[in-house]
Image: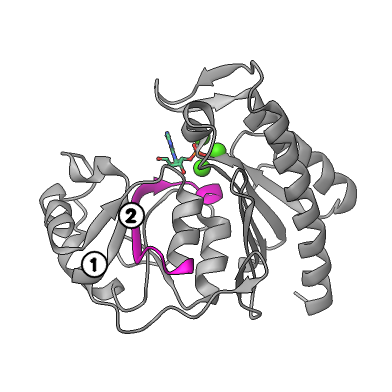
Amino acid sequence: MESSIQESIFEQAKRWVYQAGNLIKEQLHQDYKIETKSNANDLVTAVDKHIEQFFAEKIRTYYPDHLLLGEEGFGDHITHLNQTIWIIDPIDGTMNFVHQKRHFAISIGIYDHGVGEIGIIYNVMDDVLYTALRGKGAFKNEAKLSPLPRDVQLESSIIAMNSSLACQNRRVNEKKIQQLIKDSRGTRSYGSAALEFAFVAEGILDGYITMRLSPWDFAGGMVILHEVNGVTRQANGQPVQLLENNTIIACNPSLYQKLLDEYVELK
Ligand code: 2AM
Ligand code: CA
Ligand code: CA
Ligand code: CA
């Protein structure tokens, strides 16, 4: 994507993200409808839907040749990558939104022919905007993020994960995850995949491991993490598939091989 086009789309997207953040704040304490999706703990609210519709309307008006892939179904049915696609999670961390009224984010990744050009993750209640343009670095608000250090050791690392990874489960060897909990300095679970990606990019987490993320959970974070030399791979070592669910390791480059070889074993 040409640099001036990339920058003008970015400026527009950023304006919309701040507008959407204000819409979420207005509705945060209102009596919105809450429904469940795949299970009783998989929540979706009228606010999630409203925000995705907001972006769908904007994109269709201003960029009619772009496509949208969104969690709540107001986007397009996308089967291939050879166009410009906005991959949006209107609220990442819906459970946090409902229960905690904080620790949730708007996440956007804009991909052109499969190449991540723009990443935006907005921590709405903290008013912290993580951004990246391909080839131009990553930022936390106005501050440029440093490339991740290359000499990080596991024993002094903090690893984020969904706690269910350490319980008996169908996908990974939980015994090795339990060993990872012992061998690392500490573990965390924030409940927003997008924020967990942003924290790895910021260097305040050293890794994030999670099962079956959807494209809108990681699309923005992958662009941001890439700009600080972070690694995002499937847990089997394969490249992430942008249009599919992926079990993911996102981490500091110095930890990737060790996590893959010693701690993340798929069943
Ligand atoms: P969401 O809030 O947009 O649904 C929480 O564990 C993290 O995992 C959030 O980023 C959440 O995104 C994501 N997630 C993905 N699939 C989920 C599911 N079926 N139920 C709950 N959270 C899910
Ligand atoms: Ca959801
Ligand atoms: Ca999500
Ligand atoms: Ca969501």
Magenta stretch contains residue 222:
no
Quadrant where the N terminus sits is: bottom right
In screen coordinates, is 12 left or right of 34? right
Q: Residue at the front extreme?
A: 126
Whether residue 15 is situated above or below residue 135 in the rendered picture: above
- Mark number displayed over residue 160: 2
Q: What kind of residue is marked 2? A: Ala
Q: Which class describes the residues within 10 Å of circle 1: few (<14), some (14-19), or many (20+)? A: many
Residue farthest along the bottom direction in this orientation: 150
Residue 135 drawn at (x, y percent)? 64, 80
The residue tagged 1 is 259
The magenta segment: 202-217
Residue at x-position 68% and y-position 34%: 25
Residue plotted at (77% across, 37% down): 54
- Count of labels in the image: 2
The answer to whether the residue bearing label 2 lies less than 8 angstroms from the nearest atom of ligand 1 is no
Query: Does residue 65 appear left or right of residue 248 in this picture?
Result: right
Quadrant in the rendering for residue 203: bottom left
Q: Nearer the viewer, residue 4 or 130?
A: 130
